[in-house]
Amino acid sequence: MSASLTLDELAAIQRRTVRILSLGQVLGGIAFGATVSLGALLAADLSGSDALSGLATASVTLGAAAFAIPLARFAARRGRRLSLTAGNLLALIGVATVITAAATRLFPLLLIGIIMIGMGNAGNLQSRFAATDLAAPAHRARDLSVVVWSTTVGGVTGPLLLTPGEALGHAIGMPPLTGSYLFSLVAQIAALILYLVALRPDPLLTALHLARTTTTASPLGTGVDRPVVARYAMFAVAGSHAVMASVMAMTPIHLSHMAHGAHGSMPSSTDVTLLVGITIALHVAGMYGLSPLFGILSDRWGRVRVVLLGQAVLAASLLTAIFAGRTPAGVMIALILLGLGWSAATVAGAALLTESSTVTMRPRRQGISDSLMSLTAAASAAAAGWVLTTFDYAGLGIVALVFVIAITALSPLGRIRETAVDPIATS
């Protein structure tokens, strides 16, 4: 690889990288949307307990947590192309396992399959960091947010495919609530081929090569390391994700209960899945639809200010859930705001983590951040089932507010400046 890439050549590679990652996120969003929407319903059906339904989202996030650090280390050695491909392969195996579990009515096997899908989702999460590997500092959050935004297409389409997926699955004799996973299989295969063939040159390997061979100021940023700021960024991202995951995990169950209460007779499974699908689709649109705006604001206003904007929106979401969460409209508004708050905090927090770490430290810290994010979300989602059954949906919103308050109170840590310099980046 040439050590003398011009700024124009570097910009061209970055534009191509963002396009490939964006298309991959469209495919990944389709595949992941069915897991989020149907996981809780499948878990409740196979286990026979609503209280265990949160284990579906917990299993997704547990899988992502378990694989995030190994995947980041693998990326540092072999690059983003192979690491993202490995994630897609694991997700494919996971989808097949979930379908098998539904057919055999084995709840533990279902959780194993969902864990593997979560391990694959660690690759989807890594895509946003891959967008920053070669990004210019002035546009780092924007490039990251474009890749995050691309998930909107697949993420909104995935839940909306629940009803036609069920019809297709019924027509070919698949177990109930698994028809949409056929779309997941096709999307994951397409994403695997895309990354393996098209993600060249590898963005992370190129960035590491430039850091080791450039003797002048790097076009990718300085060698200044700010570990306290990086730790705050990890906390802000993990806490915001825990809020989102805990509330979203229990929303399908809460909506199912409301649907039963609103009908004199038992509502059909189609009615329930349609209500859940529309609500989750709106939530996913909130998560990703305005992410480019939050990326631009993060570049212009500063990362910490946009993190705090995200906390304000998350607080509005939780208050809506507390006071208006007994109606489908109130739940939909709360879920849209939940997605918007998550988007602002995640985009700005990821950009803050990247720019507060040297090039050689980034993969490791990014892996730790994704692992912490997934672990806190797994714990929150698992606990959310007990909170919902004990304190109702409003109680869940009150508990989630603790994370918002903590992230806001600790925000001054995001502005501390250190001057430790990466010896590789400045050698």
Image (cartoon, grey):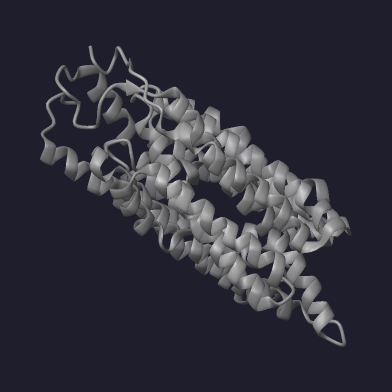
Relative vertical location of residue 80 with respect to residue 290 in this rendering, above or below: above
375 with respect to 216 (left or right)? right
Tell me residue 236's x, y (percent): 53, 40
Tell me residue 142's x, y (percent): 31, 50
| Most foreground residue, 50 or 5 | 50
Quarter of the image where one finds residue 33: bottom right
Q: In which quarter of the image is the N terminus?
A: top left
| Most foreground residue, 87 or 353 | 353
The residue positioned 38% from the left and 45% from the top of the image is 195
Number of numbered markers: 0
Q: Quadrant of the C terminus?
A: top left
Tell me residue 327's x, y (percent): 71, 77
Can residue 325 be spotted in the picture? yes
Relative vertical location of residue 157 with respect to residue 115 in this rendering, above or below: below
Relative vertical location of residue 257 with respect to residue 112 in this rendering, above or below: below
Tell me residue 25's x, y (percent): 43, 54
Quarter of the image where one finds residue 100: bottom right
64 with respect to 23 (left or right)? right
Quarter of the image where one finds residue 209: top left
| Most foreground residue, 369 or 172 | 369
Can residue 165 be spotted in the picture? no
Relative vertical location of residue 407 with respect to residue 344 in this rendering, above or below: above
The residue positioned 83% from the left and 78% from the top of the image is 260
The residue positioned 47% from the left and 48% from the top of the image is 308
